[in-house]
Image: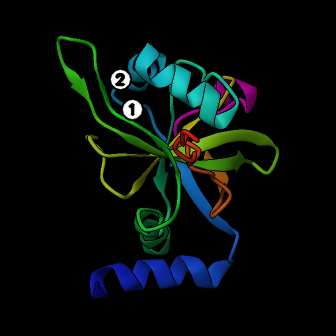
Amino acid sequence: MRTSYGPLKSALEQSTSEINFRGRVFTGLGEGGYYVSLKGYAEPFRSSLGFVPFAGTLNLRLTSPQMVERRKALDALPAVEVPGFSDGQRTYGPVRCFRAKVEENLGGAVLAIERTHYDSSVLEVIAPSNLRKALALKDGDEVSVTVEAGSSPPTRPRTRPHRRP
């Protein structure tokens, strides 16, 4: 509980509704496009976030220890939950998503992936368009991302069971 308190406190003190990040663009492992394009993820992204993601992620290496602590704090906040699935040959883990703005004007989402090669120093961002092209980014460029904490509804609305008269 104590290890979770510090990052959560830091994120919540910054703002009750937004968490700001700054990171430097880097070329990832090339797996983001593959995973984001899988039907088991693409459809839940569309229905939950309102867009079909471009086949790739924008990878940002966070610029300070405070940013890393903020990233860790996301794990304790409400998120859009995209469940894991199986394609009959392998299983894919769940993904937590946070609505976000990139450079204050482009909509997207930050992913908190259960099974990933990256640690909390990396922010993975999806959007309906190729963010590298839209913002003319290259490796090493600094980018700001604002996560809309608490604005992400659950993916499955709660419903009452049907009762017979």
Q: Residue furthest right?
A: 105
Residue 164's image quarter? top right
Q: Which mark is residue 28?
A: 1
Q: Vertically, is 131 above or below 163?
A: above
| Image location (x, y in percent) of residue 147 | 64, 57
Tell me the CA gap for discs 2 and 1.
Answer: 8 Å
Q: Residue at x 60, y 42 (%)?
A: 109
Write the residue at 45% across / 14% down. 39
Q: Residue furthest left?
A: 89
Compared with 57, 13 (above or below) is below
Look at the image and name its color scheme. rainbow
Closer to us: 7 or 82:
82
Contact check, label 2 and label 1, Cβ < 8 Å: yes
Q: Is residue 124 magenta?
A: no
For the point 53% across and 49% down, the residue is 24
Element type at mark 1 = loop
Q: Magenta residues?
A: 130-139
SS assignment for the magenta stretch, majority = loop
In which image quadrant can residue 162 be found?
Answer: top right
Q: Amino acid at mark 2?
A: Glu
> Where residue 165 appears, x then y in whole percent?
58, 41
Question: Which residue in the protein does label 2 denote?
Answer: 31
Asked if residue 159 is positioned above or below residue 126 in the image, the reply reads below
Q: Which circle marks residue 72 in the picture?
A: none
Is 137 inside the magenta-drawn segment?
yes
Label 2 Cα crowd, 10 Å radius (few <14 / some 14-19 / many 20+): few
Question: Residue at horizontal 28%, vertical 41%?
Answer: 116
Q: Position of residue 33 (x, y in %)?
A: 45, 19
Q: Nearer the viewer, residue 156 or 142?
A: 156
**Residue in front for this viewpoint, 150 or 165:** 165
* Residue 47 location, quadrant: top right
